[in-house]
Amino acid sequence: MNITSSSYKVLKLTHLKAQDYEVAIQTPNQHVVLLPVHEELVLKFRLVEGKELDECQITELNGKLDLGRAYQYALNLLSRKSYTTAQIYEKLEAKEYEIEIIQEVLKRLVDVGLLNDEQYTSSYINHQVIMGKKGPNKVKQELLQKGISDRLINQYMPVYEEEIQIEHATKLANQVIRMNTKYGPHFIKQKICQHLMTKGFNRSVIDKAIENIKLVEDSEEENPILVKEIEKLYRKHHRLMGYEKKTKVVQSLMRKGFSYDDISTVYERICEELEDE
């Protein structure tokens, strides 16, 4: 509402539903403005037909209306999902509400228990512990981005015990193995380390997870993946001879993480078998 003088007049008050009303106010330049108001404001400002309001009262009324809108907006957000105090602050700030209004909304939400950063932190960490897709470093990073303090994070993070971390990291490591069946153990270990570090696990947990998994190199038997890859490359480079063919095969498989000694041993055996066919 644009304020041009101190003379504002209530033309009509209409009851909508429950405690909600609509008040028609005539501005000093004879414009009529319709405002949705709560019964509390009707009583506070005596918004009855013929009531005149001065400039200070209009300013205060507009502030109360903005507070109501901001509070309702925050309630609508929280009805769909949980938010931290900092996130609600950012949402209200984006709507260009005054800082005083935002602070009052946050205070009211905290007072009625709809905003509780401690409860949010505890629930978030416990949920991630159950899901097992992220390590503590990733969880902490996400909470910091949501505006949660170090103090709260450190207070509730101990629930994510190392034993649980290792269990989750081992499961994720086995997923990496299943997705990289064409690669050698050395390459797979690198992939596992990179993946688990990205997921927020620390090095000691990653090392223990790798100790728990079973890679083909741990066996004294030939790696069936390596055998299959050598046979495929041997036939692919059938036009090449001797050293040149072996070099092509070895270089290709070393890039996939297989060791030179393993490649060479299996290559020689396969070479003899295929040449005897």
Image (tube, rainbow, N blue to C red):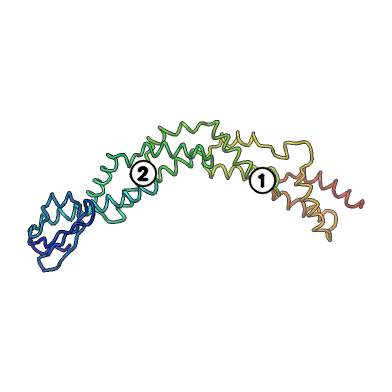
* Amino acid type for the residue under numbered disc 1: Arg
Circle 1 — which element? Answer: helix
Q: Nearer the viewer, residue 185 or 92?
A: 92
Q: Farthest right residue?
A: 276
Amino acid type, label 2: Thr
Q: Is residue 242 above or below residue 108?
A: below
**Side of 69 where 210 appears, left or right:** right
Q: Is residue 52 above or below residue 230?
A: below
- Classify mark 2: helix, strand or loop: loop
Q: Are marks 1 and 2 in contact (CB under 8 Å)?
A: no
Give the crowd class for mark 2: few <14, some 14-19, many >=20 residues within 10 Å: many
Mark 1 or mark 2: name the one nearer the start of the chain. Answer: 2
Residue 84 numbered tag = 2
The N terminus - image quarter: bottom left
User: Label for residue 99?
Assistant: none
Quadrant of the image occupied by residue 232: bottom right
Closer to us: 11 or 97:
11
Q: Residue at x 51, y 31 (%)?
A: 161
Mark 1 highlights which residue? 178
In the depicted view, which residue is nearer to us: 20 or 102? 20
Picture layout, residue 160 above or below residue 92: above
